[in-house]
Image (cartoon, rainbow, N blue to C red):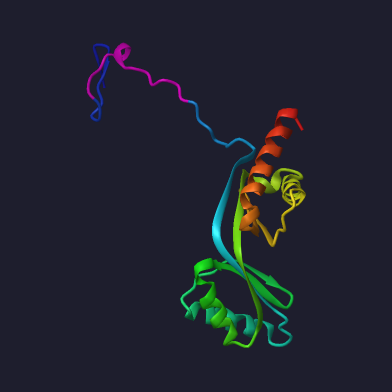
Amino acid sequence: MRRSGFVTDPLTCDVAPSTVPKPAPRETDFEKRRGVSRIEVRRGFAQCHVSQIEQNLMSRRLEALRAVAEAGVSIDFLKLTPSGMSFLVPEDKSSAVEDALRATNLHFSVRKGRSIVLVHAVNMRDEEGLIANIVQLAIGCGTTIDHIGDMHDRMLMVVPTSDADRVGKHIKTSLEAEERLGR
C-alpha cells in the first residue's frame, strides 16, 4: 500500500526510500583458489600390514578387524591388498594391536613412527598431473611412501615420522616456486 511516497508493508516500518541504507557490495567466493592451499602433518601412527592370507580372504580380513576392534582400537586409512590389508592405528595402541593380531595366527607386521602428510587442494583430481607431481616431489626428497590415498580435495601420504616435516616443507616450497615461475 502506498501513502505519500512511503511504502507500507506489515513486516516493515514506513521509511522514505532515499533514507534506506544500501548494503555495501560484498565479494563472494563461490570457488576456492585452485592448486594446493595447505599442507598438514599428523603424527603418532603405526602402520599395520596383514598379509599372506591364502584362503578365506574375506573372512580372515574380518577376523583381524574384529580382533582389533575388540582390543578397543580404532583404525584409519584401511587399504585392501590382494592377500590381506593394511591400516593405521594410534602408535600408543600398537602393542594392543600386535597382541590382538598375534591371537589370530595371521601373518602381520607393525611399523611404528609413521605420520600422514595431507596435501589440501580444491578439486585435486581435476588438476592434471597434480597428484603425480606431489608424489614425485615426496619421493625426490628421499622418503619412503608407505601408502597414498586421494579424495576430491586432498591427498594423504603415509611416511616415516622422521621425514614428515621435511616432505611437507619440500612439497610446499617446490610448488610455490613452480607457481612463481608460472608452470
Q: Write down the quadrant of residue 100 in the picture.
A: bottom right
Q: Name the chief secondary structure element in magenta.
A: loop
Q: Which portion, as a residue range, is magenta? A: 13-26
- Residue drawn where x is 72% and y is 58% of the image: 144
Q: Write down the quadrant of residue 89 in the picture.
A: bottom right
x and y percentages locating residue 181 in the rendered image? 75, 29
The reply, left or right, for residue 144 in relation to residue 18 is right
- Residue drawn where x is 74% and y is 46% of the image: 137
x and y percentages locating residue 171 in the rendered image? 68, 43
The reply, left or right, for residue 50 in relation to residue 65 is right
x and y percentages locating residue 11 in the rendered image? 25, 30
Please determine whether, in this image, residue 81 is positioned above or below residue 145: below
Which image quarter is the C terminus in? top right
The reply, left or right, for residue 13 in relation to residue 141 is left
Please determine whether, in this image, residue 135 is positioned above or below residue 77: above
Which image quarter is the N terminus in? top left
- Residue drawn where x is 71% and y is 58% of the image: 145
Q: Is residue 44 magenta?
A: no
Please determine whether, in this image, residue 9 is positioned above or below residue 5: below
Check the image and name the residue furthest to the front: 162
Q: Write down the quadrant of residue 43 in the picture.
A: bottom right
Q: Is residue 24 magenta?
A: yes
Q: Give the total number of marks visible in the rendering.
A: 0
Towards the viewer: 58 or 171? 171
x and y percentages locating residue 116 in the rendered image? 60, 56
